[in-house]
Image: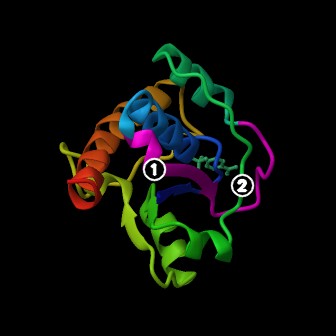
Amino acid sequence: MIKVLFVCLGNICRSPMAQAIFEHQINGTHLTNHFEVFSAGTTDYHIGAPPDPRTLSTLKSHGILFEHQAHQVNYSDINNYNYLIAMDHQNFVHLQNMKPISAMLMKMRYFDPVDKNSDVPDPYFGQNDGFETVYRILNRSIEGLILKLKEKHLS
Ligand code: 4NP
């Protein structure tokens, strides 16, 4: 089983959206047997809370229903997952400071075919269209991530 953890700050906007999109993209394929995905936040701000309503409505507008309760990343996660995928540089540094031993730590947009060197922007304090922007970035980045994981582990 290849275990992937998406990580952002609050685990109510970007990383749950990434988890939902990843699950949606592999849903109905043989890949579901090979991957386990989850998401977490670096902070305790929203532990136990559902995703932001704007996350859920954006996903729903793309035909994706999703449920999640916010979880704060901990040391057992750091050692349990094979891939830690940070949404932005701050999340990346946070995970780096937790000193993962065997997990691969990467930023989400490393897999973005359009722009590999940017962060997934935090939509929390912005307008609604920020969530659609994040959806588009994540959708294409996760396509790229799944291709790489298939190449590496399943070819
Ligand atoms: P996320 O967005 O990290 O994508 O879940 C945020 C959610 C909450 C806060 C900041 C960003 N906050 O400051 O509460």
Q: State left or right for residue 79 relative to residue 137.
A: right
At label 1, the amino acid type is Phe
Magenta residue check for 103: no
- Pinpoint residue 41: horizontal percent, then vertical percent: 63, 57
Q: What is the secondary structure assignment of the residue under circle 2?
A: loop
From this view, report whether residue 74 is shown above or below residue 11.
below
Q: State left or right for residue 4 relative to residue 40.
A: left
Query: Bounds of the magenta span?
Result: 31-50
Label disc, if present, on residue 35 of the rendered structure: 1
Magenta residue check for 47: yes
From this view, report whether residue 139 is shown above or below residue 5.
above
Q: Residues within 10 Å of mark 1 (few under 14, many from 20)?
A: some
From this view, report whether residue 85 is shown above or below residue 124.
below
Question: Which residue bears the numbered disc 2?
Answer: 71
Q: Residues within 10 Å of mark 2 (few under 14, many from 20)?
A: many
Which residue is found at the position 65% from the left and 65% from the top? Answer: 73
Whichever of labels 2 and 1 marks the residue nearer the N terminus, that label is 1
Q: State left or right for residue 32 relative to residue 69.
A: left
Nearer the observer, 112 or 2: 2
2 vs 1, front mark: 1
Which residue is found at the position 45% from the left and 34% from the top? Answer: 21
Do residues under tags 2 and 1 come within 8 Å of each other at their CB atoms?
no
- Pinpoint residue 82: horizontal percent, then vertical percent: 46, 67
Which residue is found at the position 58% from the left and 70% from the top? Answer: 80
- Using the rendered view, name the quadrant where residue 43 is placed: bottom right
